Each structure stands twice: as structure tokens, then as C-alpha cells.
Image (tube, rainbow, N blue to C red):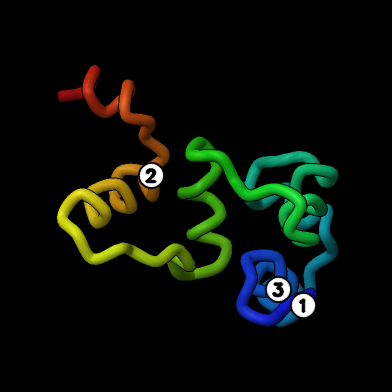
Amino acid sequence: MPEGTLGDRLRQRRWNRGLEQRDAAAEIGVSVATYRNWEVNRFIPTVKHLPATIAFLGYDWRESDGTPGGRLRLARAARGLTIRRLSEDL
């Protein structure tokens, strides 16, 4: 697994906490298959699962492009909000 990837970060966090994949998946609220696909970098979490994934890791691994729009996009997604949902809430 390439260092610094989301999969590597998830695996390291899981190992540091002494968890099995099923435990990590349950904590995040996804199936074991979904979690496993994240850990091998086959897929990434959807917006819906970002808040729980960030909570599991203890930090947001995604990088901002530094623009106001980029920071807003990260903040919105970190709360699990799609563009449509945010616009409805506003």
C-alpha cells in the first residue's frame, strides 16, 4: 500500500487501535466490503461517509487548493453535505 494514501492512513489508524476491518467498518457505519475497498484504495468515501471517516482517523486527510471555494467545498463535505443538501438547508 503506497504511503500517505487514504488506504494507508485507514490501515495505520486501525492497526494502532488494534481493530479488525469489521470493527472499523462498524464504527464508520459501512459494510466490511466498502471499508476494505477504501483500505486498498479501490474507492474513496462518499460525501455521506466523510464525517464518520474523518472522525475515525481523527483528522481530515483531504487537502484544500487554498481558494475560498476549495475551503468551502472541504468544509461542506466534511459535514456530509452535498451541494443540493446545503442549498436546501440555506
The kind of residue tagged 3 is Asp
| Quadrant of the image occupied by residue 9 | bottom right
Counting residues from the start of the chain, the first of labels 2 and 3 encountered is 3
Pair 1/3: label in front: 3
Describe the element under mark 1 as helix, strand or loop: helix
Q: Quadrant of the C terminus?
A: top left
Marks 2 and 3 sit apart, C-alpha to C-alpha, by 21 Å
Badge 1 is on which residue?
Answer: 15
Mark 1: give few (<14), some (14-19) or many (20+) Cα within 10 Å: few
Badge 3 is on which residue?
Answer: 8
Pinpoint residue 85: horizontal percent, then vertical percent.
32, 23
Q: Measuring 70% from the left and 48% from the top, which residue is drawn there?
A: 43
Q: Measuring 56% from the left and 40% from the top, which residue is drawn there?
A: 46
Label drawn at residue 77: 2
Pinpoint residue 26: horizontal percent, then vertical percent.
72, 47
Along the viewing direction, whichever of 54 and 72 lies nearer the viewer: 72
Q: Quadrant of the N terminus?
A: bottom right
Counting residues from the start of the chain, the first of labels 1 and 2 encountered is 1
Mark 3: give few (<14), some (14-19) or many (20+) Cα within 10 Å: some
Pair 1/2: label in front: 2
The kind of residue tagged 2 is Ala
Residue 52 shown left or right of residue 60 in the figure:
right
Counting residues from the start of the chain, the first of labels 1 and 3 encountered is 3
- The extreme top residue here reads 88
Determine whether 90 is above or below 72 in the image. Answer: above
Task: Report the number of discs.
Answer: 3
Describe the element under mark 2 as helix, strand or loop: helix
